[in-house]
Each structure stands twice: as C-alpha cells, then as structure tokens.
Image (cartoon, rainbow, N blue to C red):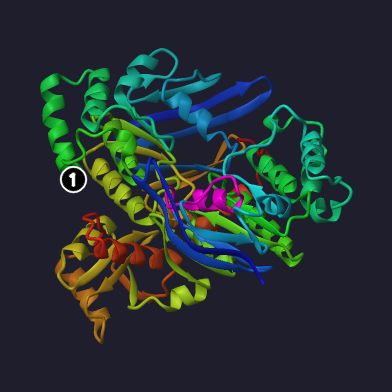
Amino acid sequence: MQAVCLQHLTKTYDKGKILAVDKVSFEVKSGELFGLIGPDGAGKTSIFRILTTVLLADSGTAQLAGFDVVKDYREIRNRVGYMPGRFSLYQDLTVQENLKFFATVFGTTIDANYDLIKEIYDQIRPFSNRRAGKLSGGMKQKLALCCALIHKPDVLLLDEPTTGVDVVSRKEFWDMLKKLKSQGITILVSTPYMDEANLCERIALIQNGRIMSVATPEDIIDAYPVKLFGARADDIYKLLKDFRKDPETESCYAFGEFLHVTLINDQGASMEILNRIATKNKHSGVQIKEIEPGIEDSFIRLMNQNRECSNRPETVK
Amino acid sequence: MEEKVIICKELTKQFGNFYAVDKVSFDVYKGEIFGFLGANGAGKTTAMRILCGLSFPSSGEATVAGFNVYRQQESIKRNIGYMSQKFSLYENLSILENIEFFGGVYDVSRKEIKERSDKLIDDLGLQKEAKKMVGGLPLGWKQKLAFSVAIFHRPKIVFLDEPTGGVDPVTRRQFWDMIYDASASGITIFVTTHYMDEAEYCNRISVMVDGKMEALDTPGNLKKRFSVESMDEVFYQLARGAVRKAD
C-alpha cells in the first residue's frame, strides 16, 4: 500500500495570483524514507499542510494511509505525526509537560509508546523539567520529534527539520530518522539542503511548485545527460568568467573548491578543450578532471531546463 | 602590509559566568572574503553584534573600519553594511523606495542615490519591477536586492549573516557572484553560512567552538591540517567536540 499519495494537487494563494503548488503528483511507499528537496518558496510547506489536513487544495486529491485528506481528515489526524518548520510546542510548558500534553490529546500515554521515543527522549531527559522555550535549537528539535511520535503515527511528516541547524546536529538528526525508519514508520521529510538528498531512499525535486523529478538519488544522478568536469586554477573567479565567456562552454558554476563545467559538445576531446580554454586565458595552477555529478548538479540542470522552457530570462550559464 | 579593517584582541563577552565569546583574537584584511563559521551556540552572533556596534564587549579590544567598539559605535554603524537571512527591507515599499530610504538613512546624497539606483536596477535586471512592492518578489531576488541595499552606501565592510539560507542552488551562486564583485571593488565581506561548499569560496575561514576561535586559515590549509578532503569534514571534526549546544 502507498502511505502517501498525491494526484495533480494544486494550490494557489491571493485569489489565484500566486501558484504555490502546481499539479503535483507523487507517491510515498509504506515504510519509505522519502525526501522532498527544494528551496524556500518551492511549495514544500503548502504540500505538508494539505497532507496534514490543515489546508485545502484548490484541486487534485491526496490520501494518507489510504484516507482522503478532505473526507477523512479526522482519521488522518490520528495517524500522522507532523513536525512543522517553525518550533510550535508550548514554550511555557516543560519538556515533560509538552510530551504529556500531546500524548493526552491523542488519547494515549507516554508509557504506551515509550519504546519508540526512548532513544531520542533519553538525550533530553536530563532537562525534562526545563521549559521548552529555554531549550537549545538541537534539543527543541528532539523534543518536537518526540511529540510528533508519541501517538505512534503511521506516517511522519517533517517540514525542514534541519534548516538553520549546524552540520553536527544535522548528522545526528538523520541518524535518528534512519532508526525510526527501521521501526517501520513512513517518513516524508523536506529539506533545502541538497546534500541530504542522498540520505533518502527516494526523492522528489521541487521548484516553483512543480515536481522536476521523482526517483532514487542514484537514478537521478545516473540520468545526468552529459559529462561533468571539475576545474580549478589559482585565480578561480577569473577562470569562472573565462569559461562562461567561451563559446564551447555549455554551463559553468562554482561548486566548493572546484568549478563545475559542461561543454556544448562533450564527445571526445573534452579535457583538451577545457585545458585549451584555461591556457588561452593564461591561467596557472590549472587542474581539470572528470567528476561524478551530485544531486545539486542535477537540480541546477533541471532548473535551468525548466527556465528555458518557460522562457524566463534568469539563467546561470 | 595589507590594510586591516577588523582587528580583535582577546575580545570577550560574558553573561554572568557564561563566556559567550572567550578571548577571541583575529584580523580581517581589506577586500577579503572572511568566512565566520561555528556550530549553533558557538558565539558567532554575539561576536558579530559587537563588531557591528550593537553590543559592548566585556573585555578585550576591537576596532572595525578603524573605529573602537567601545567608544565609536555610531561611526562603526555608518561604515558597515549588514544583511541577514531574515529579509529586512520594507515589503510595502517599492524597490526604488527601499533604495531611496536606506540610501537616505546612510546620508547618500539625492543625486548619488538617483545615479546609483539606476545602475543597480539595470545590473539586477529589475527595470520592470522597480516600482513594484518588494513583498511580491521571489525569495532569490529579495536576497540579491537586500545585499545590493546593504552595500549601497559603499561601506568598508559588509556583514552577511547566513545570506543564502533556503535559497535555490542557482540563485545561491548568483549571490556569490555578487559577493565576489563587491570584494573586488574593495568591500570586505564578513560572512556566516551553513553551506560548507560556500566556505570554500572564502579567502579565509574561521571556526568558532564554545566561544573560542579554534581555527583560522585558508580552506586549503585547513583541509591539509586535518588531512581531509572537504570543509564539511574540517567543520565536523572541530565542532563535534563542542560542549555547548545553544542557539
């Protein structure tokens, strides 16, 4: 059975002027760890709010655990655990009071599902009498996750749980998600960090309300249609400009310590062409190699393709 | 000798017996892109507030753009620009009105405001949107506009607090193009980010852990020092030892 199902879901705001979600369809399998990957304003939160039955779509349908988000909203609310992007527990209640409150609202007790949250809760237990508002970012996040899990939901919806969180806490959080998945919970998680895409089983890349691709991270990377090269030189910013100016370059953008470059004609002597461009522009310390694309490369390519299709002017060459 | 625009000596900020910033010393050079990294709670925001003239240090010395952080806060504010992830232009003013307002606040003359804003609108390709309310712009454009406004009065230093959080990967790179251009024109960039690929774009990187500056070097040298391939791993090695975990 599919845990989450969306068919042609569309949502507009401001009397139809702003198209937030544009005919979005995808499915999340039962027990899957599924990532919705896209920047701010892509439509991720609107989708989450429709799935948690707190927002109505203009058109299209969606089901969660087999229940319709409009008709069976009460059933869904009992079966879904939701962690919104903004911290939304009661700041004036203590850690333990928050947890007890959410357990009671769902007609259960902390003890009934304790095994599910034990590992996460143990990390914040030393602070169980502290008010939630006084917790650090990482601890708030753990408490919010515990509260979203306390009624043992079938599906966990996490809206940007790692936004603004540092690298160390992000790693810890994804480790927790993997453990939850191993306990059979379906997880739909959104993130603007492309590097987190690889931690999901399948992902949907979303931009401007539209799904650009749904597949495993590996398949999305395999579908990258051209060869990708990494290039660097002593003056890397000048190298970037020189590559962009050259008619043989299809695209060139910064990516960490290397530039990522693709050529219009990438059959055959690509390395020679790239080295020639660098030499022609008198660069020193030049290093060029063929590299494996990542999710972010795929995302950039799909974004630029979509922009070309819709004739929008803003394109990175 | 390169010109120093920020000088910090044993800068400290104490709240009760908690040392948010603990004897931090470093210099930032003119035109440099200086990455200011650290885990949540490491003391970045506190340090940045002192350098922006918004908060007094408890002890230690610092000058920003040649002005003393104890005695010349107002002069500091006039000579720096600031931009954060949280959008801070007026949503109900048009692009031009925002530029005019912030230009005026920083004492840019009317004539200069007119000339510079025409060029700015051209550079950003926002001719059609110039008279529209800023609130309706897409996020990426807002951030680019906010940066342009932050450097509109030609400050010596611009402080960028996670300027690209949540921005799409294409716009993020266009934003860094703007940072490079500003740096090339002599503006010093002081930037925090959670994206480790962006750390690579900085001339030098500092990493704060528990109020102390645990590392300060070029990305290349830091990777060598920790014998790792990426800045991500450098940061992870430094930050995972942190005791403090606050916001």
Left-right relation of B36 to B144: right
- The quadrant in which residue B52 appears is top left
Is B12 on the left-hand or right-hand side of A94? left
Measured as percent of width and height from the top left, residue A61 is found at: 53, 60
- Image x and y of residue A130, in percent: 77, 31
Q: Secondary structure at mark 1?
A: loop
- Is residue A39 placed above or below A141 in the rendered structure? below
Residue name at image x 39 percent, y 66 percent: A297
Q: Is residue A257 visible?
A: yes
Instruction: Give the magenta range.
Output: A39-57
View extreme (front): residue: A71
Magenta stretch: includes residue A52: yes
User: Residue at the location (32% across, 49% down)?
Assistant: B176
Counting from the top left corner in percent of width and height, residue B220 is at 42, 57
Q: Count the marks: how many?
A: 1
Question: Residue under mark 1: which chain is it in?
Answer: B
Tell me if B123 is positioned left or right of B69 in this view: left
The residue positioned 69% from the left and 41% from the top of the image is A139
Q: Which residue is mark 1?
A: B125
Residue type at mark 1 is Gly
